[in-house]
Amino acid sequence: MTVWFKILVGTGFGLVLGYFLPLPAPNEASLLSQFSDFIVSVGRYALFPFVFFSTAVALGDLRRTNKMGSVLLRSLFYMVLASLLLVLIGALFILLFSPERIPITSRRETELIFRSWNDTLANLVPKNLFQVLTGGADFLLPVYSLSFLLGLHFHFDRTVTEPTVNLFDSLSRIFYHLNSFIVEIIGWGMIVLGAAWLVQIRLIQDVSLYLQIFGVLLLASLFVIFVVMPGLLYLLVDRKNPFPWIFGLLGAGLGAFFSGDSFFSLGLAARMTRENLGVPRKVGAVNLPLFAMFGRAGTALTSTIAFFIILKSYSSLEISIDQVLWTITFAFLLSFALPSVPGLGAYINLSLLCSLYGRGLENGYLNLQPILPVLVSFSALLDVYGAGFCSFLVTRHENLQKEVPIQQYI
């Protein structure tokens, strides 16, 4: 049984289970949510050591073949382009479909755990380098940066570095195999994630107030995945059928949507881009973690739509061109400031937009707190598809792809 089918079946069973489960009392931590957190932890179990050993080896391979500069530049270019494009699409859809205002509530401000850039820099270059390896469960950036630096120095003297390179290569393959095992069994965990997600949706009071927002998010996501990305692939690469890659990332997309966690989906994407899309380790191990931390195009789109909803709800006036340009600019810029927020990126980004905008909207993001699971799900889905798409484009442009027939997709 293929991995994508296991994940699909597990998700389906989970949604059915979530429909029939009794709802927990308000403000009560349910056992299901604890199991859901455990499944996300299982999915991320091998991620940090896998990234640490694989990035260094991949960077060494790229440097040896003189492709390091082109792969990194293309990856960064596509990262910026994807975020800008999806912000513009989010703004276009919210202005075209113009959903109804939502009622303003008197919710109290809740504490959002978010590392400032001062904390980020302090943890990125600590006084003791070994502290990088104990930087926390959500802080992949110091691990990735150290691995990146090691990869740059793997070839200064081959007689000295060869044993270490071989060790890193071996450990990279071992942790890839461990990650593959986790991906194989995660279909069972999707039962829990699917059930927990639907229970959260059932807990939303007056869900009819938000149906138009759900519709805009759904239409924008379908447009990006099934129109924009295949169209760009068709125009930029070749004139072949551009849709199989969407199917190749189906398992990762489902994992991202129902977990809402970019690091959980990174483990899935790492395997599916390699074994379905033919993205080699030397590309995927370098740019996929970068996209999981900084390339949050889906988060940018979702927070753009959400912020426009808040603007409309706080004012009876139409959204002005100045407000449109301000939102596009800051939603785009802030999407790169979330390397330590793998799970609540859309909500954190929205809170930062409200805080920067001011004018009485500082706590405006709290009005969308009831639909937080939906915002996070759509942002994670588009994030992982954006990362897979850009990684696939880089591989094709660098002529590094290994063609995989669709019949052999895992």
Image (tube, helix red, strand yellow):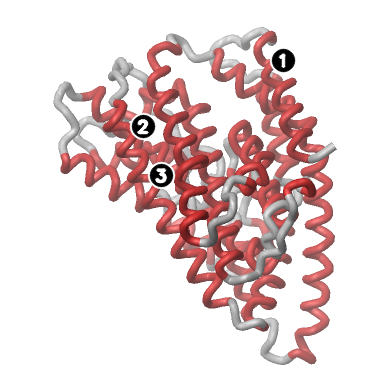
Q: Is residue 127 above or below residue 256?
A: below
Tell me the element at label 3.
helix
**Along the polypeptide, which appears first: circle 2 or circle 3?**
3
Amino acid type, mark 2: Ala
Tell me the element at label 2.
helix
Let me know if residue 354 appears in the view: yes
Let me know if residue 132 appears in the view: no
Q: Position of residue 217 (x, y in %)?
A: 43, 30
User: Which disc is residue 17 wearing?
Assistant: 1
Amino acid type, mark 1: Leu
Tell me the element at label 1.
helix
Q: CA distance from mark 2 to mark 3?
A: 10 Å
Figure quadrant of the N terminus: top right
Circles 1 and 3 in contact, beta carbons < 8 Å: no
**Along the polypeptide, which appears first: circle 2 or circle 1?**
1
Amino acid type, mark 3: Ala
Left or right: residue 348 compared with residue 255: left
